[in-house]
Amino acid sequence: MKERLFLRLFFTILISSSRFVQPFTIPNSPQQHGLKTRLHALDETKTVVVAGATGYIGRAVVRESLDKGYNTIALVRSLDKINSEEGQRLYGESFDGANVVEMDVSDAEALSNYLAGIENKVDTIVSCLASPIGTKKEAYAIDYQATLNCLNAGRDERVKARHFILLSAYCVQKPLLQLQQAKLKFEAALREQNDMTWSIVRPTAFFKSVSGQLEGIQNGNPYVLFGDGAVTRCNPIAENELAEFMLDSMTNEAKVNKIMNIGGPDSPLTNKDLGDMMHKAAGLEPRYVYAPTWIFDSIINTLQVFATLLKSDFLEDAAEYGRIGKYYAVEDMLTTKPEEKYGKITMQDHYNKIASEGKDTFTPM
């Protein structure tokens, strides 16, 4: 028990300074509930199904789809959770007007049967599925298999959906981690089939992923930097602008059957730049604590030795979690090509907003 508590504490601190992305929800059985209708006319000629709808980007995609007037189906893990007081606080506004369906995307047959029974033909399936931790078993179950189930359901002769949009990740270009390899395996399956057109979107990082230390700064804590604070650079993208970019591929021929890297409008930002921005938003003088990057290797190697000796899946997963933390602490998540930058909302805009108005419900602090 002490071992688990220690590892949980360590990796919570470790990942808080990284840029690991997008939480995942894995649904259960087919029940549905229509939330209050929005005040606009739906374009019922296009039905959009969003898998992983309760994730950070999934929620934004549902909202963007509704704002575009599409008949929107949000696949979720639990209707009870969505309809609870906490669920309404988190998802009420985003899901207002959507058809929210409880569905287990790991059940390929149930998923295909549900899509086949939808009255309005499915036009587009958007997968925002991603493993929350990134261990091998979980990554291949979610980033590969569950996402493949969504693709195969769309390809079903009874469904024949037109287009598939995949939320992937910029980091798959240097696939050192299990989660990246699982994503690439699905990307290959998507590209190889000919039944549906597709768009693969690889965002650099999300605003929420680089906001975790702001509350600590506001409470008087220093900002934690790895190395000299300039080891990595990034240009994260706002969730609503990413959702806009993704859904544009439904009607923009230039985005069809394309793999697209995408980041926000900022120039390259180091970790120290992010810390400076947070302190500025909080109206405080910068305070930093520097941690050496070799600390990752020491802990990863130790965990891996004991995982091998003890044949422990738990320690194996802990070692992989450490590799994830190291990856996002030392690798750039950066696009510099003008065509790979999108949106107008900057990191400073985001920090100013959550410092003055309070954090977004999906932004860890």
Image (cartoon, rainbow, N blue to C red):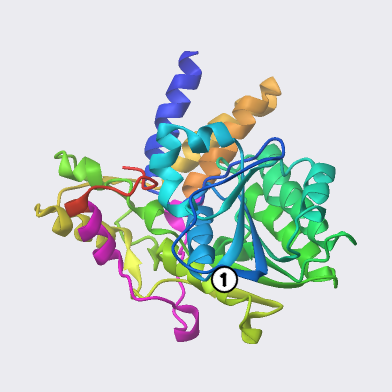
Image spot of residue 1 (x, y percent): 50, 13
- Determine if the magenta segment contains residue 78: no
Image spot of residue 109 (x, y percent): 85, 44
Q: Is residue 76 above or below residue 260?
A: above
Image spot of residue 118 (x, y percent): 75, 55
Residue 26 sits in which quadrant? top right
Residue 2 in view in this figure: yes
Could you tell whether 307 is left or right of 112 in the image? left
Q: Which residue is mark 1?
A: 247
Q: Give whichever of 127, 259 is nearer the camera.
A: 127
Q: Say how many tags the image has.
A: 1
Q: Is residue 308 above or below residue 41?
A: above
What is the quadrant of the C terminus in the image? Answer: top left
What residue appears at the point 43 percent right and 69 percent down from the top-left corner? 241
Q: Give whichever of 47, 58 is nearer the camera.
A: 47
- Determine if the magenta segment contains residue 338: yes
Image spot of residue 267 (x, y percent): 33, 76
- Provide the secondary structure element on which disc 1 rests: helix
Residue 218 sits in which quadrant? top left
Residue 305 in view in this figure: no
Could you tell whether 123 is left or right of 33 in the image? right
**Furthest-top residue in this view:** 1
Q: Give whichever of 226, 254 is nearer the camera.
A: 254
Q: Give whichever of 117, 321 is nearer the camera.
A: 117
Q: Is residue 65 above or below residue 249?
A: above
Q: Report crowding for label 1: few under 14, some 14 to 19, many 20 or more residues within 10 A (C-alpha).
A: many
Q: Which residues are magenta?
A: 327-354
The residue type indicated by label 1 comes to Leu
Residue 122 sits in which quadrant? bottom right
**Furthest-right residue in this view:** 157
